Every structure is written in C-alpha cells, then in structure tokens.
C-alpha cells in the first residue's frame, strides 16, 4: 500500500475489511467527485463476495449523501466485476494513479436513484 494511504483513508472516508488484524480489502468514495475509488480485495480473500460488500457499503454512503449516480474508472481486469454490480460503460480512457502510473481504464456509471 502506498505510504499516503493512511491520510487518504481519513480524508476520503474509506471503509476497511479487517480480519485478525489484517486488512483484507478496502473501498472509498470521493464525495466531491461522486466517484467510487479504489475497491480492492486481497487475493487471499477474493471470490467470497467481499468486493461486492465493500462496493455496496460505498454506494450506501453515496445514497446517504443524496447522489443519484456514481462514476468510477475501472481497470480492464475489473470491468466484469463492476458490470455484475450494475455499472454501465460510458467510455474508455486512461487513469493516472496516485503513484504516477497511467493505466488503461473503462469509465463506468451506476445510477443509484432507481432510474434505468
């Protein structure tokens, strides 16, 4: 995890999944941008629904803030996960990571207000 994640966790309201003192996953919401940020599950905890639970928690936060939709920049290997969770592709592009790495991504959107 990058060194600045501690400050980011406090600033952006991240939720952590912890078991036995180990972080198994995290997700966050950039409220100012109405954007889901950095949903991650440790490979040892993958395939058990933890990512979907974390994502649902962040979406609930967005609903509480009155957001009708949230966006995200999905890495190519995460597109299917978000599609399973009712995110729609809105375009393709590149995302600049906090560490300065530029990666290909798919821009996605999910309506939270029940609209189709």
Image (cartoon, helix red, strand yellow):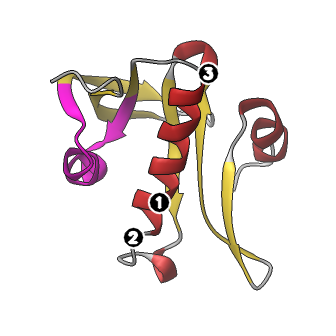
Q: Secondary structure at mark 1?
A: helix
Within the magenta stretch, is there residue 27?
Answer: no
Residue 91: x percent and y percent?
19, 20
Q: Is residue 89 above or below residue 81?
A: above
Magenta extent: 72-89
Residue for badge 1 = 53
Between discs 3 and 2, the one toward the N terminus: 3
Q: Left or right of 51: which side holds 37?
A: right
Q: Is residue 34 above or below residue 108?
A: above
Residue for badge 3 = 31
Q: Secondary structure at mark 2?
A: loop
Identify the image quadrant of residue 105: top left
Q: CA distance from mark 3 to mark 2?
A: 24 Å
Contact between labelled residues 2 and 1, with CB atoms less than 8 Å apart: yes
Q: In the displayed image of the protein, which residue is found farthest to the top? A: 32
Residue 49: numbered disc: 2
Residue 67: x percent and y percent?
48, 18
Q: Left or right of 103: which side holds 10?
A: right
Front residue of 75 and 66: 66
Q: Secondary structure at mark 3?
A: helix
Residue 63: x percent and y percent?
50, 28
Q: CA distance from mark 1 to mark 2?
A: 6 Å
Q: Is residue 59 above or below residue 113?
A: below
Contact between labelled residues 1 and 3, with CB atoms less than 8 Å apart: no
Q: Is residue 45 above or below residue 9?
A: below
| Quadrant, the N terminus | bottom right
Residue 38: x percent and y percent?
53, 44
How dense is the environment of label 3, judged by Cα within 10 Å: few (below 14), some, or many (20 and up)?
Answer: some
């Amino acid at each position: 995890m990058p060194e600045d994640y501690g400050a980011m966790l406090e600033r952006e309201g991240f939720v952590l999944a912890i078991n036995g003192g180990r972080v198994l996953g995290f997700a966050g919401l950039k409220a100012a941008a109405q954007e889901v940020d950095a949903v991650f599950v440790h490979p040892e905890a993958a395939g058990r629904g933890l990512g979907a639970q974390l994502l649902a928690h962040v979406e609930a936060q967005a609903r509480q803030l009155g957001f009708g939709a949230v966006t995200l920049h999905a890495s190519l290997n995460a597109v299917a996960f978000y599609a399973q969770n009712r995110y729609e592709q809105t375009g393709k592009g590149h995302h600049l990571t906090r560490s300065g790495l530029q990666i290909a991504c798919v821009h996605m959107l999910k309506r939270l207000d029940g609209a189709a």
